[in-house]
Image (cartoon, rainbow, N blue to C red):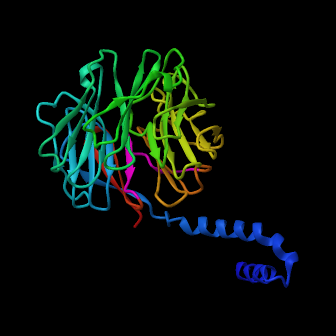
């Protein structure tokens, strides 16, 4: 069918059948649908393959690099690394930081990674290693007593953002363009004011996403909103969402497959089995959000696209779910709980991590 339409358009372009030019939109639509369908992996046998971390920490940060390399972080100053696909996990701990809660990690490769701890005041920090975690350099130490970091995200090995709960009525946002050697704070005048009682959740390291020139940050509490930047974090706007909100409720995780299409997930962490107004989609870069109303997804702390596809995986304390149609419909994947999830860029390989030292690899076999 498509071959016939292209031949007809070729004749039209040569002036022999101009009446067929109206077929161009149809051809493009059919091609787009065919390409989208071709992007879908076979998820029939998708499951989690448990791995042994060797420790009992609660993991909230994870970063997959490729099919062999991934980093994970959590309570009691824990940070682990695998370079063999998860067959073994080695400690990559920060000396003297065993009381910190490392809620996010971003890995560049097997040697270079950024590690972020969450907590009030000086417990919020950013470290970097360039030797596989043997040594760590303290890059940022929060000295504001009310400060509390929530997550980090990087466009590349040198440029990234960190963000935290509001200070002086505005989200606390940091930016680096030199690999973390320096972090400068984005001026409050470039960030919309928060609503009283609005804040973010340091639940999975995925409340912030960067892609292209864009960046997005999610909130909850008194308001569940999405803060959006189109100039690599220099200036921000904020949009309301129809999400559930409250002291322990809001948007916990964001994921985007391109600059326009994304998904938000969350709920109320004190009601882990509830799933009302906790899943929404955007098709305009985060300017508007529409609830996915017909689903059975409970509270989830993390959602991620399987790279290069329309498929999504979401995890939370009561289990995990999978979608093959851009988040419109969902199927239960497992009942074992995880806090966070990461797929390797451009690959269908990923890991999830959670409480009690739990780590599992996403397996399609």
Residue 344 part of the magenta-drawn span: yes
Q: How far across and down, in percent of the image, does residue 142 sit?
A: 27, 23
In front: 73, or 29? 29
Q: Is residue 342 left or right of residue 242?
A: left
Q: Position of residue 186 (x, y in %)?
A: 41, 28
Query: Foreground: 159 or 103?
Result: 159
Whether residue 338 is visible to the viewer of this picture, yes or no, is no
Most distant residue in the right direction: 19
Query: Is 78 or 268 nearer to us in this picture?
Result: 78
Q: Residue at x 52, y 20 (%)?
A: 193
In the image, taking residue 87 as reference, residue 2 lies left or right, namely: right
Residue 202, position in %: x, y? 38, 31
Which of 126/67 is in front?
A: 126
Quadrant for the C terminus, please. bottom left
Expressed as whole percent of the image width and height from the top left, the position of residue 330 reads 57, 50
Magenta-colored span: 330-345
- Whether residue 49 appears in magenta in the rendering, the answer is no
In the picture, measured across the screen, residue 234 lies left or right of residue 64, that is right
């Amino acid at each position: 069918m498509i071959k016939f339409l292209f031949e007809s358009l070729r004749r039209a372009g040569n002036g022999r059948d101009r009446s067929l030019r109206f077929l161009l939109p149809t051809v493009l639509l059919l091609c787009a649908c065919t390409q989208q369908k071709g992007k879908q992996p076979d998820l029939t046998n998708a499951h989690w393959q448990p791995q042994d971390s060797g420790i009992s920490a609660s993991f909230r940060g994870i970063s997959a690099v490729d099919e062999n390399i991934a980093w994970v972080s959590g309570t009691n100053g824990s940070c682990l690394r695998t370079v063999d696909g998860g067959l073994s996990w080695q400690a990559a701990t920060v000396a003297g930081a065993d009381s910190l809660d490392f809620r996010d990690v971003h890995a560049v490769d097997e040697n270079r990674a950024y590690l972020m701890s969450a907590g009030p005041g000086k417990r919020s920090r950013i470290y970097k290693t360039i030797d596989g975690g043997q040594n760590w350099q303290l890059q940022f130490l929060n000295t504001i007593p009310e400060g509390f970091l929530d997550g980090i995200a990087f466009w590349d090995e040198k440029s990234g953002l960190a963000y935290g709960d509001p200070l002086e009525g505005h989200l606390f946002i940091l930016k680096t363009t030199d690999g973390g050697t320096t972090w400068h704070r984005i001026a409050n005048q470039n960030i919309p004011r928060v609503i009283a009682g609005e804040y973010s959740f340091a639940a999975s390291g995925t409340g912030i996403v960067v892609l292209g020139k864009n960046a997005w940050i999610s909130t909850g509490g008194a308001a569940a909103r999405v803060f959006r930047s189109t100039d690599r974090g220099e200036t921000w706007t904020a949009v309301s969402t129809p999400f559930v909100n409250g002291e322990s409720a809001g948007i916990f995780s964001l994921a985007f497959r391109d600059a326009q299409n994304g998904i938000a997930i969350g709920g109320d962490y004190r009601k882990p089995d509830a799933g009302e107004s906790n899943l929404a989609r955007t098709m305009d870069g985060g300017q508007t959000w529409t609830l996915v109303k017909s689903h059975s997804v409970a509270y989830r702390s993390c959602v991620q696209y399987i790279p290069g596809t329309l498929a999504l995986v979401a995890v939370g304390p009561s289990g995990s779910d999978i979608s093959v149609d851009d988040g419109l419909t969902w199927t239960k994947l497992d009942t074992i709980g995880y806090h966070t999830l990461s797929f390797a860029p451009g690959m269908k390989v990923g890991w999830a991590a959670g409480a009690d030292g739990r780590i599992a690899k996403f397996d399609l076999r």
